[in-house]
C-alpha cells in the first residue's frame, strides 16, 4: 500500500516517460559482453582496464538497451560507473549522451528496475555521474536530463515503499544523492541549462513529499530524512535570487514548508529532529546563525566547547581552537605560522610596530576537521559565510574587544598527510592587517585586492610556486599589464586575483623593494592618495615587468610529475560526511572516489 503523500508520484502517465530512440544502434560484440560480465570490480575501477574507451562505452550503452536479465545489467551499469571515474569522459559527444539517455530512459521504465534495488542504485549513480556538470558543452546533456527526472521521482517513491534492507538502503541513499549532486552542480550557474531544467521540474515537490512521510525514517535512523533535507537545501540555493538579496516568493515558500515540516518532526522526536533540520536543511541552504536563532524551535546551535574542545597556545599573539588536531599536528601548525613572520617583517620593514588604533594583538585560528564541519559549525558558532575555502575575519581593529580570526579546516583529501588548508596564506592577511593596512577590511576604496592576495601568496610561498608559474607560462601572451593588475577586483577571476597579483608583488620585491615598502607605509599611515600615485608611477615599469615575466618563464622548469592519469573524482565539497549512513560502506560493490 502506497503512502498517500507519495502516491501521486506514481501517477505519471506512460506518455510522459516514453521517448523515441534518437540514436542508431551499435552492433553488439558478444565477446565484449562476456568480458564485462566476468571482469572483477578491482580491475574495472582502474586505469588499467582495457575496456575504458569510447567504443567499449558505446557497446555497454547498447547492451543496456538490449539486456533482459539483472545480472548482465548489473555488470553493464557498474561498468558505466567505473568509466565515469577512469574513462575519457571529455571525449563523449552529444551522440554518446543521446544514446545513454535513451538507454537510461528505457531502463527506468523496465520491470527489471522496479524489482531490483541494485539496478535502482545504478540508475541514480549513472544519472549524477554523467549529468551533474555545467560546462558550456554540456548544455545538450542538461536538456536531456529533463527526460530522466520523472523516472528519478518515480524511483524515489518506489524505494520508499519497499521494505528496508541493505540493498534498498543503498538504492535510496544514491537516489537522494542524485537529487543533491545534480542540484549542487547546477546552482553554480544559476542561468545555466541544467539549473533551469531542475527548477522547471520542481524537484522540491517529490523531496518534500518524501521528507514529510514516515517512510523517510527507518526506525530510529533518520538518515533518509536528513539526506532529503540536504537536497532541499541545495534546491533552495538553485532557486533564482531576488534583487538585492531579497527573499523571493519561491524561496519563502520553501522555507515555510521546511519550517512547518520540521516543527511537526520536533513535536514527535524532540532534539533529534532539530539536529536533522539544522544539519540537513539550514546550514546547507547557508541560512546562517541569526536565522537559526530566529528559528529556535527547530534550529539548534551547539556549545562551542562541544565542537571545538581543543585550545592550544602557539605564542602570546597566536592560538588555535581545534576540533580534532593531535599534539603533533598542533605543533606543526604553530611552527608553520610563526616561521613566516620574520620574512614578512623583513620584506616590509615594519619594525614589528602595529598600525595605529589596532587592537588585534592576537590571532585566533579555528580549525575544523573537514569542509562539512566547517560549513555547518562555521555558520552556527561564528556566523560566517562558509561557501569558500576558509576565511579571515579582521573585524573592527579599533574595538578593544575585537578578535581577529582565521577559520579553516584540514586538507582532508590528502590524508594521511596533514595540512590545514590555506593556513599560511591567511596568516599573512592577519599580519598585513595588523602591521600594514590601517583600519578594517574595506577601509580603502580600491586597488587593494592585488596587494592583499598577492602579498599573502608571495610571503606564504616565496619563490617556490610552481602551480602559478605553470599558469603564467601557459598564458604569458595574455598577461595583464601592471595597471590592470593593480586594479584587480575579486570578480576578475582566480588567476588575476592570486597568480598575476603574486607575480606583481614578487616583481616589486625583487626589482623595486624600496617602492614596495613605500606602498606599505602609505597604507599604514592611511595616505591612500600617496599609495595610488605610487601605483601609477610603478605602472610605467610595464616594459621591465614584461621582460622580467619572460625571464621567469624561461627559468621555470616543471618538475617531473606522476604520470598516472587523474581520476574523475566526485567534487570533494559536494557531499557531507555526517550525512553518510554508517552501515553503508563504499566497498568493491559500491565504489566511489
Image: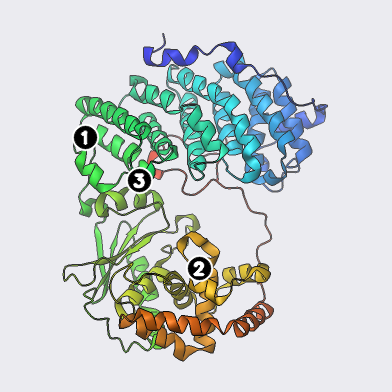
Q: Nearer the viewer, mark 2 or mark 1?
A: 2
In the image, which disc is placed on residue 271?
1
What residue did someone put label 3 on?
245
The residue sitting at 43% across, 38% down in the picture is 240
Label 3 neighbour load within 10 Å: few <14, some 14-19, many 20+: few
**Residue 436 x/y as whole percent:** 34, 80
In the displayed structure, does residue 34 sit left or right of residue 43? right
Check disc 3 and report its element: helix, strand or loop: helix
Q: Residue furthest left?
A: 400
Check the picture and name the quadrant holding the N terminus: top left
Which quadrant of the structure image shows residue 109? top right
Q: Are marks 1 and 3 in contact (CB under 8 Å)?
A: no
Label 2 vs label 1: CA separation?
Answer: 44 Å
Q: Earlier in the sequence, mark 2 or mark 3?
A: 3
What residue did someone put label 2 on?
498
In the displayed structure, does residue 553 sit left or right of residue 354? right
**Residue 36 x/y as whole percent:** 72, 32
Amino acid at each position: 500500500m502506497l503512502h498517500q503523500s507519495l502516491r501521486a508520484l506514481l501517477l505519471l502517465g506512460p506518455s510522459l516517460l516514453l521517448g523515441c530512440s534518437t540514436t542508431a544502434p551499435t552492433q553488439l560484440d558478444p565477446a565484449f559482453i562476456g568480458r564485462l560480465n566476468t571482469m572483477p570490480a578491482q580491475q574495472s575501477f582502474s586505469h588499467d582496464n582495457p575496456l575504458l574507451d569510447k567504443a567499449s562505452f558505446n557497446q555497454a550503452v547498447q547492451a543496456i538497451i538490449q539486456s533482459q536479465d539483472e545480472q548482465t545489467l548489473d555488470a553493464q551499469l557498474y561498468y558505466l560507473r567505473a568509466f565515469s571515474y577512469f574513462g575519457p569522459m571529455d571525449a563523449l559527444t552529444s551522440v554518446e549522451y543521446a544514446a545513454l539517455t535513451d538507454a537510461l530512459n528505457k531502463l527506468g521504465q523496465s520491470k527489471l528496475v522496479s524489482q531490483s534495488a541494485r539496478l535502482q542504485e545504478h540508475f541514480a549513480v549513472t544519472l549524477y555521474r554523467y549529468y551533474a556538470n555545467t560546462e558550456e558543452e554540456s548544455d545538450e546533456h542538461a536538456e536531456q536530463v529533463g527526460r530522466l527526472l520523472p523516472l528519478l521521482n518515480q524511483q524515489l517513491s518506489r524505494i520508499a515503499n519497499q521494505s528496508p534492507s541493505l540493498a534498498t538502503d543503498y538504492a535510496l541513499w544514491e537516489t537522494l544523492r542524485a537529487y543533491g549532486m545534480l542540484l549542487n552542480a547546477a546552482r553554480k550557474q544559476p542561468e545555466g541549462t541544467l539549473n533551469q531544467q531542475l527548477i522547471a521540474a520542481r524537484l522540491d515537490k517529490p523531496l518534500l513529499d518524501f521528507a514529510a512521510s514516515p517512510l523517510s525514517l527507518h526506525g530510529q535512523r533518520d538518515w533518509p530524512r536528513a539526506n532529503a533535507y540536504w537536497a532541499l537545501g541545495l534546491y533552495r540555493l538553485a532557486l533564482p535570487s531576488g534583487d538585492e538579496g531579497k527573499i523571493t516568493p519561491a524561496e519563502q515558500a520553501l522555507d515555510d514548508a521546511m519550517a512547518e515540516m520540521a516543527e511537526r518532526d520536533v513535536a514527535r522526536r524532540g532534539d533529534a529532529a532539530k539536529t536533522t533540520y539544522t544539519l540537513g536543511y539550514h546550514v546547507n541552504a547557508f541560512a546562517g546563525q541569526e536565522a537559526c536563532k530566529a528559528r529556535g524551535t527547530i534550529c539548534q546551535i551547539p556549545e562551542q566547547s562541544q565542537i571545538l574542545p581543543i585550545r592550544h597556545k602557539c605564542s602570546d599573539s597566536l592560538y588555535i581552537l581545534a576540533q580534532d588536531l593531535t599534539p603533533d599536528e598542533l605543533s606543526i601548525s604553530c611552527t608553520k605560522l610563526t616561521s613566516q613572520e620574520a620574512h614578512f617583517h623583513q620584506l616590509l620593514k615594519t619594525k614589528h610596530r602595529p598600525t595605529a588604533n589596532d587592537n588585534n594583538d592576537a590571532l585566533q585560528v579555528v580549525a575544523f576537521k573537514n569542509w562539512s564541519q566547517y560549513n555547518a559549525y562555521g555558520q552556527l558558532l561564528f556566523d560566517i559565510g562558509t561557501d569558500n575555502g576558509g576565511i579571515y575575519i579582521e573585524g573592527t581593529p579599533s574595538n578593544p574587544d575585537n578578535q581577529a580570526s582565521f577559520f579553516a579546516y584540514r586538507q582532508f583529501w590528502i590524508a594521511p598527510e596533514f595540512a590545514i588548508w590555506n593556513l599560511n596564506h591567511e596568516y599573512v592577511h592577519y599580519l598585513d592587517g595588523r602591521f600594514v593596512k590601517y583600519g578594517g577590511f574595506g577601509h580603502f576604496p580600491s586597488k587593494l585586492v592585488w596587494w592583499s592576495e598577492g602579498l599573502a601568496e608571495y610571503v606564504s610561498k616565496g619563490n617556490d610556486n610552481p602551480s602559478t608559474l605553470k599558469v603564467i607560462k601557459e598564458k604569458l601572451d595574455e598577461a595583464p599589464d601592471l595597471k590592470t593588475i593593480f586594479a584587480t577586483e575579486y570578480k576578475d577571476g582566480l588567476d588575476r586575483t592570486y597568480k598575476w597579483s603574486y607575480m606583481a608583488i614578487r616583481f616589486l620585491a625583487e626589482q623595486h623593494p624600496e617602492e614596495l615598502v613605500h606602498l606599505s607605509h602609505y597604507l599604514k599611515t592611511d595616505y591612500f592618495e600617496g599609495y595610488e600615485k605610487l601605483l601609477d608611477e610603478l605602472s610605467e615599469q610595464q616594459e621591465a615587468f614584461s621582460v622580467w615575466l619572460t625571464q621567469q618563464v624561461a627559468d621555470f622548469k616543471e618538475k617531473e610529475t606522476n604520470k598516472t592519469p587523474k581520476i574523475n573524482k566526485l567534487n570533494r565539497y559536494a557531499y557531507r560526511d555526517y550525512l553518510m549512513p554508517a552501515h553503508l560502506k563504499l566497498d568493491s560493490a559500491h565504489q566511489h572516489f
